[in-house]
Image: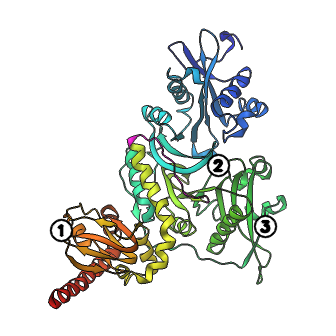
Amino acid sequence: MLPPSDSPAPLVTRDGIRVREAIEPDVPAIQEIFRAVYSETYPYRHYYDPIWLKRALYTDDQVILVAENVATGDILGTASVVLDVGAHADLLGEFGRLAVREDARGGGVGQLLMEGRLAAVEERLHVAVVENRVAHPYSQRISHANGFAPVGFLPLKHQFTARESVALFARHFGNGLRLRKNHPRIIPEAYPLAHLALQNVGLASDPIVDDSAPGYPYDDRFEVDTLKAEGLPLLMRIERGRIRNREVFGPLRLQYGFFKLTARQATYLVAREVAGPDAGALAGAIGFVRDTYDRTVRVFELICHDDRSIRFLFQQLLERCRSEWDVAYVEVDASAHAPHMQRTLLELGFLPAAYVPTMVFHDVERLDVVRMVCLLVPPEFDAVELTPQTEALAEAVLRNFRRQAVLPQLHEALDRLALLDGLSERQALRVAGACTIAHFEPGERLFEVGDPADRMYVLLNGSVVVTLASGQEVGTVAEGEALGEVALLLGERHAAGALAVGDVAVASLDEAGLRMLTRQQPDIAVVLYRNLAQGLGHKLRRADLRIGLR
């Protein structure tokens, strides 16, 4: 340990602890802290490598700090800011890699490290993000206390002892918000998340919901291979996706050169024409970084001559992730002004997981980004500890992932559901995406007389008997029909009960989901309300006949 006089000037000093930039003699202490806190499970493996750490201290891509006991010189904790998580012009930094010795916790070391990082880099950034663990709320609270706000929830992103989710927070500096391009165009599935994220960072919720933008078409008249150095000049001649019409963003760019790309373990899948006069010509490429320990892939660039190869390249990447590389998590930062790209990703199984205002700098403005995530492992989310603001945003994200898990069941039943008559398949899937699945055993009640009516049900299979408080049966609801819709629409409690006959599966649409569809998709709402009225009419006629027979 160097004497205090030979150490860098402190950024923050309080209660006998100073935070300063790390120097080479601190490397063993930094490694020891990470091993003590995470054993061998930390996803950023290079923090266990002394050679990498020593080099990192002398680069401009990172700022590594330590918290030091003034009296003893002991290193109590460490944290860093990674400045190459975006393109150089993005002025984006990630506050991460924070660890505090167990015997120093509870003494404000984490808060001091956060203050030190802010003092070190706030004049160098427009936007800062931080991934907070959700196994406990401590880092979330520190982020809240220092002006960061939740903008995303990244499910099962990292591999610790088991896969863990993280909450993404953001803070803006200087001209970060003044240069924002207003009124982004986003798909409806991203709107609840975008609304909360913008509200959390103090911006008006101004996105334009675009449900008419189709995804890019599929064309398989290509062959795919991995980019070699000799192919770089040919790919550099393609403008779309590099210098114009950029729809995907990340920390690397093709023009950084083959050596730097290889050093960062970046790879491109390249699509080539297989027929016609252009056979063998480059059609496009998708750039990505794969982390074999964390089992993650991050797409950072998409370059194409035209629309034809876009979906093909993403599908080829996902096929390799599933069949060859054992990848668990794939993420793409898509422009919030590119609904065609967002729709394409959605159709390929990606879902909105974060909305970061002004995350990238493009042309003369800063653009919002929709971070889309494809989970290739079962969406089994363990209990997490979230602050109230984080919890609301996490629920907006997880709602889509839970629904995605049941969409195959709903898709099989689409042609049997009277509620969806008259809707296109895409509109019907939009409604299905707002539903959840519930199962009831024989004799189990879906609801009782007087229960609050906070949702309606559509029977996927089985049947349900409708009963009065006296126990008298007044009707039967069959497969494909709606149940509980009247009380929901009137805002009243249930006037009758519902009892499962045999095994019953239902699609459940709650009040919030119906309200969102009505607000965002008035064309769908008109058809839904017409079908609900017709279905109610059929049930009333059956009830009249039943009473008449008696």
- Select label 2 or label 3 by which is in front: 3
Measured as percent of width and height from the top left, residue 219 is found at 65, 78
Q: Quadrant of the C terminus?
A: bottom left
**Residue 149: x %, y % from top left:** 44, 41
SS at mark 3? strand
Rendered image: mark on residue 251: 2
Q: Which quadrant would residue 42 be assigned to in this image?
A: top right
Residue where numbered disc 3 is placed: 225
Q: Residues within 10 Å of mark 3 (few under 14, many from 20)?
A: few
- C-alpha span from label 2 to label 3: 23 Å
Pinpoint residue 177: horizontal percent, then vertical percent. Answer: 44, 45
What residue would you read off at disc 1? 469
Q: Which residues are magenta?
A: 376-388
- In the rendered image, residue 166 lying in the magenta stretch gets the answer no
Judged from the image, the secondary structure of the residue bearing numbered disc 2 is loop
Residue type at mark 2: give it: Pro
Residue toward you, 358 or 390: 390
First along the sequence among labels 1 and 3: 3
User: Amino acid under label 3?
Assistant: Asp
Circle 1 Cα neighbour tier, 10 Å, few/some/many (<14 / 14–19 / ≥20): few
| Residue beneath the point at 58% across and 18% down | 10
Closer to the chain start, of discs 2 and 3, is 3
Q: Quadrant of residue 528?
A: bottom left
Q: Quadrant of the N terminus?
A: top right
- Report the front residue among 258 and 342: 342
